[in-house]
Amino acid sequence: MNILLLGIGNVLWADEGFGVRVIERLQKSYCFPDQVKVMDGGTQGVYLVEHVQAADVLIVFDAIDYGLPPGTLKRIENRDVPNFLGAKKMSLHQTGFQEVLAMAQMLGNYPQHLLLIGVQPEELDDYGGSLRPIVKAQIQPAIDMAIDYLQAFGIKAEAINRDGDLADPVLNIQRYEQERPTADAACRIGDDRVLQAEGVELRPPQSSDQRSVQVEVDYRGKY
């Protein structure tokens, strides 16, 4: 059986990078048989469809809004996975991955076994931020959950210690956290020089998405 361990998410937005960080730990700390592929899917969306089609067993790691306390780890299996992603999507990459699953099913090559291992995020609106400690602490439990699941298919993971990085070495979690500029040097949530400027009006969100703020700018020749 072809098995794919896939992490999706965006490391630039704090806890949304959980899935990618799980893959980073897997790549550095574990070795699997040849039929197991460990992949950082990032935010590639529909470009992942060929990899999903090739998998008989697919395990996905991601940050998921379960409506539970931050740091809660939860698993969803098989047909519930795409429905859950569609109902509680937090970002565009989840919409994209829901489409990937739909495309794979439409094309007739869909994983026989599908497992989503997700963590409830604590913070998303922190550009350039890393995982919050309560979420970071769930990386190893998520891996343990996946390894236990794979035992049913006769797959064993060998613990190793490998030096290596994600596709871009600058995204290595230790380097990423150590080299982050201070909040004074690099604004993380919005530029007060713009938000407090005359002619900029902030209004409450018009939808249930509390992460967005509608900004209307009065162009009167001032910018």
Image (cartoon, rainbow, N blue to C red):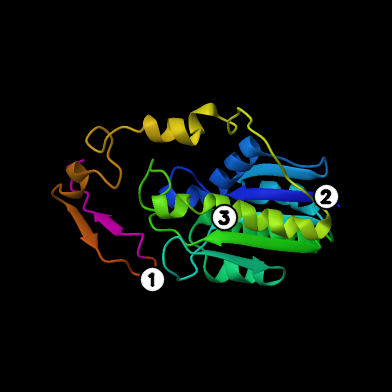
**Which mark is nearer the camera, 2 or 1?**
2
Across the whole image, how many numbered discs are drawn on residues? 3
Q: Position of residue 168 (x, y in %)?
A: 55, 29
Q: CA distance from mark 1 to mark 3?
A: 31 Å
Q: Position of residue 70 (x, y in %)?
A: 42, 62
- The residue at the point 78 percent across, 50 percent down is 3
Amino acid type of the residue that numbered disc 3 sits on in the rendered structure: Pro
Amino acid type of the residue that numbered disc 1 sits on in the rendered structure: Ser
Magenta range: 210-223
Left or right of 52 on screen, residue 64: left
Residue 221 in sight: no
Q: CA distance from mark 3 to mark 2?
A: 23 Å
Q: Residue tagged by mark 1?
A: 208
Disc nearer the start of the sequence (1/3):
3
In terms of depth relative to the viewer, which is nearer, 196 or 137? Answer: 137
| The magenta stretch spans residue 221 | yes
| The magenta stretch spans residue 190 | no
Q: Determine the secondary structure under disc 1.
A: loop
Q: Determine the secondary structure under disc 2.
A: loop
Question: Which picture quadrant has residue 154?
Answer: bottom right
**Which mark is nearer the camera, 1 or 3?**
3
Q: Residue tagged by mark 3?
A: 141
